[in-house]
Image (cartoon, grey):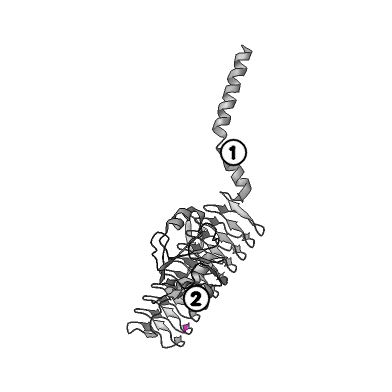
Amino acid sequence: MTGETLGTLAARVGASVVGNPDRQIRDIRTLTEAGPEDLAVYHNRRYLSDARESRAGALLVKDPTPFPGRDLMVSGDPYLALAVLLEVFHPPRRPSPGVHPSAVLATSARLGVDVSVGPFVVMGENVIVGDRAVLGPGCVLGDGVCVGEETVLHPRVVIEAGCRVGARCILHAGVVVGSDGYGFATSGGIHCKIPQVGAVVIEDDVELGANVCVDRGSLGETRIGRGTKVDNLVQIAHNVRIGEHCLLVAQAGISGSTELGHHVVMAGQSGVVGHVRLGDRTVVTGKAGAVGDTEPGSMISGFPGRPHAEWLRAVGNLFKLEALRRRVSDLEKRLREMGE
């Protein structure tokens, strides 16, 4: 890439320039790897010394104060500006439209304009794929599946029969949408499978990380709301309903028939039991387990999940128990001595 001036790049993201707006920027690199023709981002005080020592030609910052004499791009939201600028220097690569000769498509499958179908893709009957969608190698779309326009399926994504994925979604490698929900009726010590006959609906602008599993509803649907972003290795069980713009972090798990409001955050390895509702903007912290309904704006920690402030007090008291035990033991000893 030939590069752009610092001033031109700043204009793209509504930022201002301190220093030389004509400085040429050819790439974006980390603080420690950047050179005189690179832009580096500083967004966390932990890396202040790295930023001051960086050889970067310019820094993308929120506050210019710690960097006198440096060429700076100043933005109210450096992380968001970084997201835009990375696409300038590293635009997404899209494969050429067309169907690879090794792909197997039912005659009733319908493809939109400029769709890319990779090697060994399999499509069942009555599949519909929207304009400019990309299906990576080894993807499998069951009968009646619908995939929206500009959606990207990375290699080995499986979308089972009857499920729908919206527009501009990204499903990373190994995602399974529409696997059977975990439903069994036990009689006489024998577990009898309950047929899972519902579907999965994924709304527009959703991203699912690698190896995410979304179970189909036992009856009715499992639904993931618009704009929700799901990290790797997350389990979403049957008949779960997830609201818009939620964030589900690695190894989180959601049990069946649970409902999440909008903008809910589930941190890494957190979980929620079945048949409860997490209110809008609820945060479930790392490794916490939500076991009941929550009010909007709640923060839940620990297991069983408790309000975050209450959990912090309890944990703080836990680490004082040894000192308390010693004090009680000393008091008991003194009382015995007084009695003698």
Specify whether 337 is left or right of 21. Answer: right
Where is residue 17 drawn, in percent x and y?
53, 69
Query: Looking at the image, which is closer to me, 334 or 62?
Result: 62
Q: Quadrant of residue 321?
A: top right
Q: Quadrant of residue 293?
A: bottom right
Q: CA distance from mark 2 to mark 1?
A: 55 Å
Answer whether residue 285 is magenta in the image.
no
Determine the secondary structure under disc 1.
Answer: helix
Q: Mark 2 vs mark 1: which is more N-terminal?
A: 2
Q: Which residue is mark 1?
A: 317
Query: Looking at the image, which is closer to me, 196 or 49?
Result: 49
Q: Which residues are magenta?
A: 124-128
Q: Which residue is mark 2?
A: 8
Q: Amino acid at mark 2?
A: Thr
Dot 2, how many residues are within 10 Å of its Cα: few (below 14), some (14-19), or many (20+)? some
Dot 1, how many residues are within 10 Å of its Cα: few (below 14), some (14-19), or many (20+)? few
Residue drawn at 60 percent across, 42 percent down? 314
Say whether residue 50 is visible: yes
306 up-or-down from 93: above or below:
above
Residue drawn at 41 percent across, 81 percent down? 123
Query: Looking at the image, which is closer to me, 52 or 153?
Result: 52
Say whether residue 182 is visible: no
Image quarter of the C terminus = top right
Q: Amino acid at mark 1?
A: Asn
Residue, far left: 102
Determine the secondary structure under disc 2.
Answer: helix
Image quarter of the N terminus = bottom left
305 up-or-down from 121: above or below:
above
Where is residue 295 drawn, in percent x and y?
67, 58
